[in-house]
Amino acid sequence: MIHREVVVLKEARNDIKQGKDFYNSIEDGVGAYFVNSILSDIESLQFYSGIHTKNFGLYQSRCKRFPFSIYYEITNDIVYVLAILDMRQNPNSITERLNR
């Protein structure tokens, strides 16, 4: 089993913060649960990166507990997390974000 380093880029960290803020606006404490859930999904990429299907030229891993997907690429056995996007948004917004 390959163990890869995972690097979360600034844009993806901003996505996590936006998701946390959104869920905290609904109910206090849910934002922290969101962050912990997303971080767990990101950590799993150390072992399971590369098994997911590709969309927009990037691997897409669907999050287990929230309607988000993690978009990443693998270069020289390092996993780069580029975006963590809410899948309930307009598909055109997702396309625009990932084609930057």
Image (cartoon, helix red, strand yellow):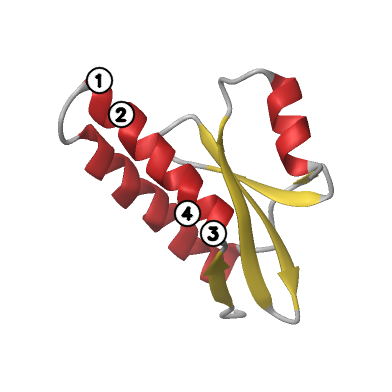
The percent position of residue 60, horizontal first and vertical second, equals 67, 46
Q: Which residue is mark 3?
A: 10
Tell me, yes or no, whether the two marked residues, 1 and 2, touch with CB atoms within 8 Å.
yes
Which numbered dot is residue 23? 2
Give the Cα distance between marks 2 and 4. 16 Å
Residue at screen point 74% across, 42% down: 98
Q: Which residue is mark 1?
A: 26
Which numbered dot is residue 47? none
Tell me, yes or no, whether the two marked residues, 3 and 1, touch with CB atoms within 8 Å.
no
Tell me, yes or no, whether the two marked residues, 3 and 4, touch with CB atoms within 8 Å.
yes
Q: Earlier in the sequence, mark 2 or mark 3?
A: 3
Residue at screen point 70% across, 31% down: 94
Answer few, some or many: residues within 10 Å of disc 3's Cα (few below 14, many 20 plus, some between 14 and 19): few
Q: Which residue is mark 4?
A: 13
Give the Cα distance between marks 4 and 1. 20 Å
**Of 81 and 100, which appears nearest the observer?**
100
Please state which of the two labelled residues, at mark 2 or mark 3, is closer to the viewer.
Answer: 3
Secondary element at tag 4: helix
Horizontal side of 4 relative to 38 (left or right) equals right
Q: Earlier in the sequence, mark 4 or mark 1?
A: 4
Secondary element at tag 3: helix
